Image: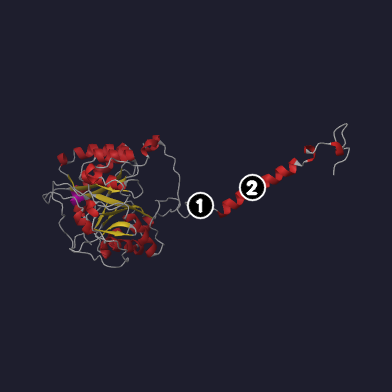
Amino acid sequence: MGNDLDAPLGLSAAKRPIWARIPFGIIGLSLIGLVGAVIGVWLVFMRDPEGGEPHAVVRLDRAKTGIAKSDVAVAEPPRPAEETPPPGTPHGAARPAQQGLVEVTPAPDAGLEPVPAHRVPEAVEGQPLSTAPIARVSEKTRWGLLPRIASDGSRPLDVYARPVPRLPQSTPRVVLIVGGLGISQTSTQEALRVLGPDVTLAFAPYGASLDRWVQKARADGHELLLQVPMEPFDYPDNDPGPQTLIASAPTEANTDRLMTLLGRLTNYVGVINYMGARYTADPAALGATLNELTRRGLMFVDDGSSSRSTGESSARAARTPFARADVVIDEIARDEAIQARLTQLEQVARTKGVAVGTATALPISLRNLQTWIKALEARGLVLVPVSAVARQG
């Protein structure tokens, strides 16, 4: 309660204006406390829309990586005119080549039995490859359009393989797989521009408009793989991305994630691991995944990045067509290092008759690969797609 000692000189407490008697300080502190309480409740109870999916933000230094900020963008390649769906067709809807597909939700262990090896690819050398899914080796499911073995035993591996000419047995063959496509518009366009059709392309499952990129790559004659993210030893600090297959997860959970990934694109002959040193070192986890790939008529390619991988033995047990990379070409992204790895790849091909190399669509890698491919035939080696060297399970 105020008194005359608190009042301004010459003005008693009773004669002060009403606004002068309002406790603004107390009201201000109360409002601050109320706002703080509201923020605290929001932080505690609001759901994180990215909760449960570890993620990381990486600062790209062009001086060190050769990747410009413009290289990381949503991919929007031009849609081939003959593949343009009718107006109003929603994303993921069936194209004309998909008509007649039946909506099913297959049980993980049902049907899709493996078929005998060494089937002849349907495409004829010199003819264009299919740019849309082929109905008899596709099925509509709750995960999207998935590959399957046809009733006549044809596998997606057979139907979507790029044919190769008959070669003398003594001709050294080289498989070149370039991955990381479909995310960066710049690098994907450049890869399609400079890499010939005998180079196998591996698409990441995270890009936008992947169906358009697939159509463009297939129209150019490329055989395709799907990159499947698998758990590395330092996960989640090193995170391959959403839907990563985890070694300690239940088989059903990994199968569901695998189906989600397989539904992201079409017209591929198999999958290749992305990271995955821990996952590929676990024969039980990897074996369950390879069993599913076998039932769906796909091959598995080990990218060669881990010496502890059980890929070959697990593929043999699951009867999965298999190939393993002998050389990771751009593990060190410098000109001299890449050129040394390409020389090593040639030596392996001459020694073993066939060699498999993997690379990423970095500008420095594409530049070196383009130069190397141009002179390859003159040195007596031939590029072939990965399906041509698959070891049958």
Q: Quadrant of the N terminus?
A: top right
Residue 337 visible in the current orientation: no
* Label 1 packing within 10 angstroms: few (<14), some (14-19), many (20+): few
- Lower sequence index among marks 1 and 2: 2
**Near-viewer residue (282 or 348):** 282
Amino acid carrying label 1: it is Asp
Q: Quadrant of the C terminus?
A: bottom left
In the rendered image, residue 216, in percent from the top left (x then y), is placed at: 25, 43
Q: Residue furthest bottom?
A: 110
Q: Is residue 105 magenta?
A: no
Q: Main secondary structure of the magenta part?
A: helix
**Near-viewer residue (327 or 256):** 256
Q: State the image quarter where residue 74 is shown.
A: top left
Residue at the disc numbered 1 = 48
Q: State the image quarter where residue 58 is shown.
A: top left
Residue at the disc numbered 2 = 36
Q: Which residues are magenta?
A: 350-354
Amino acid carrying label 2: it is Gly
Residue 171 visible in the current orientation: yes
Q: Are marks 1 and 2 in contact (CB under 8 Å)?
A: no
* Label 2 packing within 10 angstroms: few (<14), some (14-19), many (20+): few
In the rendered image, residue 111, in percent from the top left (x then y), is placed at: 26, 67
Q: CA distance from mark 1 to mark 2?
A: 20 Å
In the rendered image, residue 149, in percent from the top left (x then y), is placed at: 23, 61
Mark 2, secondary structure of its residue: helix
Answer left or right for 230 relative to 270.
Answer: right
Mark 1, secondary structure of its residue: loop
> In percent of the image, x 22 and y 53: which residue is there?
97
Colour mapping used in the image: secondary structure
Q: Is residue 49 above or below residue 376?
A: below
**Near-viewer residue (272 or 192):** 192
